Amino acid sequence: MKEKLSAELERFKSVVETYGAREEAWPAADLPMMQRLLETSAVARSLLRQETKFDLLLQQESRIPPASAALLGRVLRSAEDVNRGSFLKSLWPFGSLWQPAAGMAMAACLGILLGFASPDILSSPEEDSLNALVFSGSSLLDLENDYENI
């Protein structure tokens, strides 16, 4: 019996440390066991009181104090000092613009060169013969005669 109570108290401690002291945050499967332990065990009630104090401490420490007017003024003044410069400098603050532009131009030239130099992998032999007929300079009558002869 003591082993079962010990295991239940360990589970109680684990749930309270994980989910906090509020009962509505506890898992529904553990809720009956935890309520029974709170009614019967002084250790469980002590653990819950400690967790309640810890939760209150966390709530108090997590409140952000409002910023003073002096701090806000210092931040705005330092922002003005940082942002001094031309409009172009504010659009591209990473130094000279010629290096990335030259890199993009080289990439575009290389892409065009590879596009012209690579074989046409998307066309089929039927399309090649059709393209040869269309672009050969033959007249429509020549094409009709060729079609009749086939």
Image: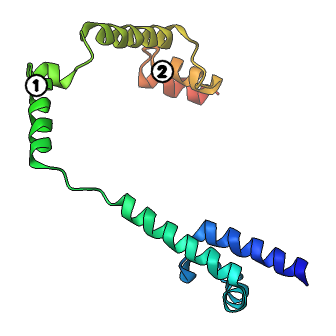
Element at label 2:
helix
Circle 1: is it few (<14), some (14-19), or many (20+) Cα within 10 Å?
A: few
Does residue 46 lie above or below 118 as drawn? below
Residue 20 makes an appearance in the image: no
Name which of mark 1 and mark 2 comes first in the sequence.
Answer: 1
Three-letter amino acid code at the position of disc 2: Asp
Image quadrant in which you'd find residue 149:
top right
Relative height, residue 12 to residue 136 (above, below): below
Question: Which numbered tag is attached to residue 70?
Answer: none
Residue position marked by numbered label 2 in the rendering? 142
User: Residue 127 lies in what quarter of the image?
Assistant: top right
Give the residue displayed 11% in from the left and 36% down from the top.
74
Along the line of sight, which residue is nearer the eye, 30 or 108?
30
Q: Position of residue 19 (x, y in %)?
A: 59, 70
On the image, which quarter does residue 106 sit in? top left
Query: Looking at the image, which residue is at 37% across and 64% down?
Result: 60
Q: Residue at x 69, y 68 (%)?
A: 14
**Residue contact between numbered discs 1 and 2, judged by CB atoms under 8 Å:** no
CA gap, disc 1 to disc 2? 78 Å
Quadrant location of the C terminus? top right
Residue 71 visible within the image = yes
Please tell me which residue is depicted at 13% across the width and 30% down the height of the picture.
Answer: 78
Amino acid type at circle 1 is: Asp
The N terminus sits in image quarter: bottom right
Picture coordinates of residue 122, whole percent (x, y): 58, 26
Q: Is residue 68 left or right of residue 19?
A: left
Question: What residue is pinned by disc 1?
Answer: 81
